Image (spheres, rainbow, N blue to C red):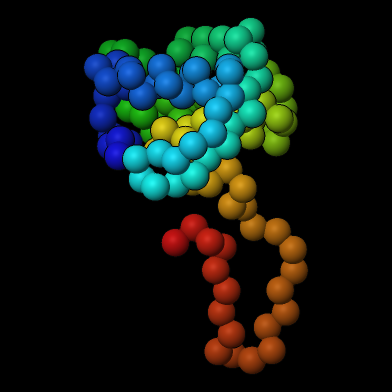
Amino acid sequence: YWDEMESVHTNSGVQNFWFYLLSQGGSGTNDLSNSYNVTGIGLNKAQQIAYRNLTTYLSASSGSTYIDSYYGSLQAAIDLYGNESAEYWAVKAAWYAVGIGGSPTGYCGGTMNFTNYSDSFSDGSG
């Protein structure tokens, strides 16, 4: 389990594995017992996303955390490749693999019709 508030600068092993998975891909089960499957996007695209994140969205002087890096790298992927691009989903999947963020396949969709006042639903996020 990696604490999302730990400093990204002093505990970079997590981000190193994130980068490896983002560029090369991989599958397995993480320390939180979550199964993951990451489709790699290649070294060049992974470098572009990581570099944009580091130079645009993170700051060493402000003590950026893993959750800052998570959100910054998602925004960097959007900036470079577009919202909901394959690169965006790979970034999200790689973070999930290292224990940061929610499932990359767990977003809501579809239509639900309630039939009475006591119906309920879940988006699966807990």
Left or right of residue 56, residue 119 in this image = right
| In front of the other: 28 or 85 | 28
Where is the N terminus found, in terms of image quarters?
Answer: top left
- Which quarter of the picture shows residue 109? bottom right
Left or right of residue 6, residue 48 in this image = right
Q: Position of residue 60 (x, y in %)?
A: 31, 13
**Residue occupying the point 56% across, 9% down:** 47
Q: Position of residue 83 (x, y in %)?
A: 70, 33
Q: Position of residue 122 (x, y in %)?
A: 55, 68
| In front of the other: 16 or 10 | 16
**Residue occupying the point 52% across, 23% down:** 21
Q: Residue furthest front?
A: 28
- Which quarter of the picture shows residue 88? top right
Classify 89 as above or below 35.
above
**Residue occupying the point 44% across, 61% down:** 126
Q: Can I make out residue 56 in this image?
A: no
Q: Position of residue 59 (x, y in %)?
A: 36, 15
Classify 111 as above or below 91.
below
**Residue occupying the point 34% across, 40% down:** 31
Q: How many marks?
A: 0
Classify 104 as above or below 115.
above
Q: Can I make out residue 87 in this image?
A: yes
| In front of the other: 29 or 48 | 29
